[in-house]
């Protein structure tokens, strides 16, 4: 099943907020992403119907295994690309924005080659 970039962004944001805050609600996502609560509600309904998330009676959102897999992959790419760009001398805030723009579209082959290059040149630091 093809997942859209916007859905990947929501899943990634849920993972980031979960790591930072422990609990995630729709309002947290709306605030963090700068989108309206109705937009988040529609996205959460679609993600829930696709089996990527679940939501309890209090509105707390949990990533289900398929959603967690996608979120982890995208967030890992984001962090790796950001570190790579910073190693090239790009300002951290610019590096993070640029990583966000390409994390979804970069082919697996190009991403793997970029990581291998960076590692072979000792560019990547955690």
Image (cartoon, helix red, strand yellow):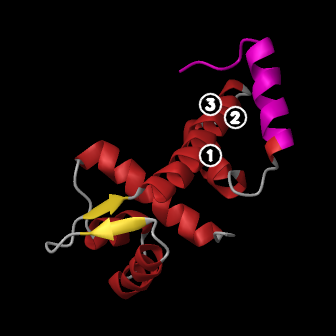
Q: Residue at x 68, y 24 (%)?
A: 87
Relative side of 87 to 61, left or right? right
Q: Is residue 39 above or below residue 118?
A: below
Of the image marks 1 and 2, the number of the one nearer the N terminus = 2
Q: Residue at x 69, y 56 (%)?
A: 104
Distance of mark 3 from mark 2, alpha carbons?
Answer: 6 Å
Residues marked 3 and 2 touching at CB (< 8 Å): yes
Say which mark, if any, is on residue 83: 3
Which numbered disc, 3 or 1, marks the residue closer to the eye?
3
Magenta part of the chain: 109-126
Of the image marks 3 and 1, the number of the one nearer the N terminus = 3
Residue 41 on the magenta segment: no
Distance of mark 3 from mark 1, alpha carbons?
Answer: 11 Å
Dot 1 falls on a residue whose secondary structure is helix
**Percent position of residue 71, x then y:** 51, 52
> Can I make out residue 90 in this image?
no
Say which mark, if any, is on residue 85: 2
Foreground: 53 or 23? 53
Residues marked 1 and 2 touching at CB (< 8 Å): yes
Q: Is residue 104 above or below residue 80?
A: below
Q: Label 3 crowding class (10 Å Cα cut-off): few <14, some 14-19, many 20+?
A: many
**Percent position of residue 40, x then y:** 39, 78
């Amino acid at each position: 099943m093809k997942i859209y970039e916007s859905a990947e962004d929501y899943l990634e944001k849920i993972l980031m907020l979960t790591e930072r805050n422990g609990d995630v609600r729709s309002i947290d996502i709306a605030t963090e992403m700068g989108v309206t609560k109705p937009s988040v509600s529609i996205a959460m309904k679609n993600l829930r119907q696709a089996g990527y998330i679940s939501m309890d009676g209090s509105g707390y959102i949990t990533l289900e295994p398929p959603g967690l897999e996608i979120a982890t992959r995208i967030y890992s790419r984001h962090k790796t690309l950001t570190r790579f760009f910073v190693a090239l001398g790009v300002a951290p805030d610019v590096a993070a924005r640029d990583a966000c723009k390409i994390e979804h579209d970069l082919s697996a082959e190009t991403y793997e080659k970029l990581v291998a290059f960076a590692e072979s040149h000792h560019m990547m630091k955690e």
